[in-house]
Amino acid sequence: MNREKEIWRQGPDEAARKLEAHPESGLTGAEARRRLAEYGPNLVEEAESRPWWRILLAQVANFIAGLLAAASVVSLLLGQEVEAVAIAIALLLNVAIGFFTEWRAERSLEALRHLGMARSRVVRGGKERQVEASELVPGDVLLLSAGDLVPADARVVRAEGLTVDESALTGESISLAKGPDAVEAIAEGETPENMLYRGTVVAGGGARCLVAATGMDTRLGEIAKLAGEASGGGTPLARRLERLGRRLVFLTLAVAAAVAALGFATGKPPFLIFETAVALAVAAIPEGLPVVATIALAQGMWRMASRGAVMTHLEAVETLGSTTVICTDKTGTLTENRMTVRFLSLPDGGEEEPDGKFSDPAVRALRAAVLANAAELGGADEQPRGDPMELALLRAGREAGLDRPELLRSHPEKRREPFSADTKMMATVHRVDGDHRAWVKGAPEAVLAACDLEDPVRAELEKRQDELARRGLRLLGLATKAMEDPGGDIYQNMEFLGFVCLEDPVREGVVADVDMLHDAGLRVVMVTGDHKATARAVAEKLDIIRSGDPDPHLGSELADLDSLTEEQADELRRTPVFARITPERKLDIVDLLQRGGQVVAMTGDGVNDAPALKKADIGVAMGKRGSQAAKQAADVVLTNDDFTAIAWAVEQGRVIFRNIRRFVVFLLSGNAAEVAAVALAMALGWPLPLLPLQILYLNMISDVFPALALGVGRESGDVMNRPPRDPSEPLLARRHWWEMAGYAVLIAAVCLVAFVLAGTTRQAASEAFLTLALARTWHVFNMRGPEEHPLRNSVTKNPLAWGAVALSLALLAAATYTPLAAILDLRPPTGPATLYVPLLSLVPLAVVQLVKSFWGKERNE
């Protein structure tokens, strides 16, 4: 049971009684085992990997796969065993490609999900010992020191200079001081000063704590539950393909029913009617659609993997391309999560950067920052230890020739006052030339209050403090004091030395990435746990806030989305920065944007990002710095933590969607031509110009290979200079259906012309088949963009397109001049047909190229 709410308002002794704990001796071994049985192991449940059978089931549970399966069964019932087997092979090919691709992605992600449990120092039975972190129980006495990962939620009962990095939990990029005193109230988005939470890191000092909650009862566990409850609702591409599949079902049934009714009305034999219905069903079903869609997405997935990204779902590649809003955390994503000293602000108003050339006043100020410090830079073979902010101060001091170990030799430390939540300062007292002097650093307002300053000077310094804070800088006040008695009171009548100004620098290249995304019509929204002023300053540096944008909003303003007016909701949707955000509020932001019809991508690396990553249309987690919870919830894990990959992925997603749209138009228009040819011949009382097995073979050679070439082509257009697609726009808009109808009429017309010229005999059927097959082969070149040159475009520059044409022609020749012709009931063309068959097949290509060259200038395909 999570007892946090019962104890952070209590003093240390009362908290120990509530937890039935013994702060000095700890639990006995028997009591620890009893509580472990009662509360369970200290584990946060991980999202289970999908078993192989669920991945397989996902590949067959769609309408197009159902259509193929139904067509195979119907063919088998009608005695068309060859057709049934051929359709089944097409189905199995699609399922196999999709299964192995997603299985590979799942296995790749497992490496990122792996997390070993560390050991923790506890006191049990009056003795310090190490136990597996999974064996911690409520009431355990936990010992922590700088660098330790906090393994459970714990109540501090004793602390010495304790600071904790909670950036993974709260998004706050600075370390926070912690102590044992009771806390009466906290603001939203903050954590109690006497509580430590699982997943955070001890930045400096040490502590003795009482474990308050373990496993799923921790704050991390609660966030994991939120992530598990969040629902993404499927990706846009998956929804589009599902809608297209449903439409094809009804279209196929309607065509088959219409032709069957026509056949009965004209007195055709029942078997011929059923045979024709099967032929139309086979013609209408795009066997290559699921295969090529899967390969196109997989190719994009593998391309992304080569750039340091792991996609957990195939559709995630395309979904980034349809994104309209990217919600991104600040710390560790837009910034480096590394404090750096920008400059010193001296009492006279001067500013000096740490470039190795400091004035005497600046050196005095830096001496305070170096001596009043608990961190260690370490040597060449040692890792730095301590608070990132204090490490930054030591680095700046080293630039000025103030190395702490050397200073301590000439300024031996005689006394240390650790940072306290009460004073908000820390101090060290040193012996200097026979005298004693204290060096102090701390919160600027606390340091100023403890310094001996005249009122006008104090007012001017307070004004400068506010101005520096509005620039997004983290400020520390520095002071010194001569001490007659080294044990005397330090924090009064001090000499003010200046402000040290630090910042968490933005990642290299992020500004250019943000500008590129804006040019592509995407909105970048920064969602952070930082203060409002800090968040705004960083957002301005990154060009996230632009002219006309609303001011940053606080998470508390999202308390009740349902009570917002439309004007309020609209302003929040246009807001580029949200500050002081909790995990619940991040979910609210994603929900608010999605209600407004936006396709939302969420990037992040902290534990607090996990629920929003799961809820968003696509979640993008950082792999190196990302928390376990974030990686489990994400659709995409960036193994190199490179924000640039997000912008590149958006571009690739747009390219992939355009390629998918192109090959869908190619497939359906070619198949519609077959339907039109068969239906019109049936209506005119002619023999069937195409047999079911011929149609299936034609679909396999004319659909799969050219469509695959279109699906994996590299677009050379300016996709990132266009706005995002309307999220509600279907995969095929009305204009695409009219376009496909035109293609189908042209191809069907030349097929039937060849059939009539040859006398509508079985030999004529062979020539009609060849005309249609050739026309569909050249049809791939009709898929260029209207704005592209007829001869030099993204299709003609694609070597795979030429390879697909060559392969289709080779397979067509094999079907005509090898023993395969007997199975397909085909005969080679003879006499005049050797001339008019290829000429007729070129007519649709010529007509379309002329139309696109003169009238097809619209850019938005």
Image (cartoon, helix red, strand yellow):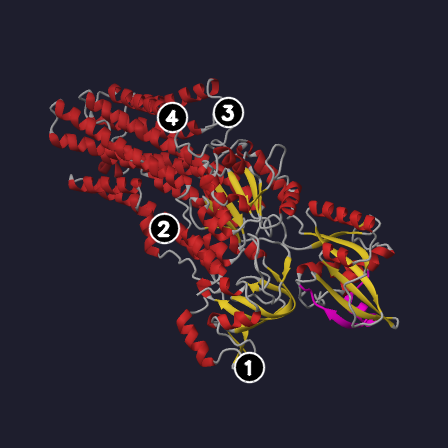
Residue at point 39%, 27% (across, down): 736
Residue 173: horizontal and vertical position, in percent?
Answer: 62, 54
Q: Residue at x 60, y 51 (%)?
A: 331
Which comes before the other along the chain, label 1 or label 4? 1
Q: Earlier in the sequence, mark 3 or mark 1?
A: 1
Q: Are marks 2 and 4 in contact (CB under 8 Å)?
A: no
Disc marking residue 734: 4
Q: Is residue 823 left or right of residue 657?
A: left
Residue tagged 1: 127
Q: Residue at the spot x=40%, y=73% of the render?
A: 37
Badge 2 density bin: few <14, some 14–19, many ≥20, Cα 10 Å: many
Residue drawn at x 47%, y 59% is: 113
Do we see residue 350 in this rendering?
no
Q: Secondary structure at mark 1?
A: strand
Which is more N-terminal, label 3 or label 4?
A: 4
Q: Is residue 812 left or right of residue 515?
A: left
Which residue reaches farthest bottom? 126
Q: Measure the C-alpha gap from mark 3 to mark 1.
A: 78 Å
Circle nearer the viewer, 2 or 1: 1
